[in-house]
Image (spheres, helix red, strand yellow):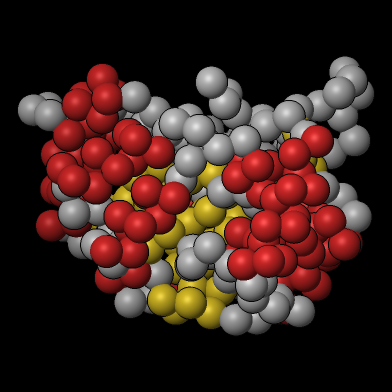
Amino acid sequence: MEKRRLGKTGHMSSVLTFGAAALGQVSQQEADAAIELAVKHGVNHFDVAPTYGEAELRLGPWMEKNRKEIFLGCKTTERSEAGAWESLQRSLQRLRVEYFDLFQFHGVNDLETLNAVLGPGGALEAVLKAREQGLVRYIGITGHRPFVQVEALNRFPFDTVLFPLNRVLAARRNDYSDFSILLDQAKQKDVGMIGIKAIAKRPWQSPTHVYRTWYEPFDEQTDIDKSLWYALSQGITTAPMASDVSLWPMLLDSAERFQPMNSEEQAAVVFEARRYQSIFPTA
């Protein structure tokens, strides 16, 4: 599997990230099998969060034995210094590790939240202290609003930024869904880019959900190829795998066959996606 430089961290991350949200509601046996599958195919970047059900506990036994083999990213939704410190310590314990390669402020979707995180007594103070103590190597931010993430990169030298990037969003581009400015900003500042929801298709159309994803995903190999290849052709470093392990074999296969799309090919798959409603607000 291709590996790309994660911005100024210098880490060469696999183009697929182990999306540990998929482990939130599975057994330990299923989790172990998913980890083995991903690692076998060259995935070396893992992403987890305390809000992902039991994912930290499912990863813990493997992480305890194989910590040095992967780049481990974790997150917090806490906004205060005290809350973020407690969250970080708890995640370390649950994952049975001594440090995080990357620690991210999760779901920062408005300027009020950004101000709280970066301001006096905010979560950033806890993470900076953790970095001084060797508990964190790099600091990142995640969110679904491009203008908020652009502002964040202007205020603090984040090492990574995580945001949604898919062809359905591109087909409905406006101030809420246009991530082109963020892509340009991150490239200029050498910030590692992590693109989530690459194979998101639309909101679920019925109460019955076939997959453990909160959106309906593309689930045919051809459509997954179009979606993942589009995302990877935007210059991001890596794309986390969907939160249902049953989709992973197709994603891994697609990543291993990845071919960059030219502008005409990108335009075609975006045009094709115009029929679908975005999973995020577009107005």
The N terminus appears in which quarter of the rendering?
A: bottom right
Q: Relative to 254, is 205 above or below?
A: above
Q: Residue at x 63, y 48 (%)?
A: 166
Q: In this view, does 221 lie above or below 215?
A: below
Q: Which residue lies furthest to the front in this view?
A: 264
Which image quadrant for residue 113?
A: top left
In percent of width and height, residue 240 lies at 60, 56
- Count of numbered marks: 0
Q: Say if 104 sits above or below 176 in the image.
A: below
Q: Quadrant of residue 173?
A: top right
* Residue at 21% from the left image edge and 24% from the top image edge: 116
Given residues 108 and 260, the one toward you in this image is: 260
* Depth check, front residue: 65 or 104: 104
**Corner quadrant of residue 170:** top right
Residue 245 location in percent, x, y? 78, 53
The percent coordinates of residue 210 (x first, y second) are 90, 35
Can I make out residue 166 in this image?
Answer: yes
Depth check: give the residue in front, 276 or 242: 276
- The answer to whether residue 244 is seen in the rendering is no
Q: Which residue is drawn at 49% across and 67% down?
A: 235
Residue 226 appears left or right of 112? right
Q: Where is residue 124 in the image (x, y as percent from the top left)?
A: 19, 39
209 lies left or right of 172: right
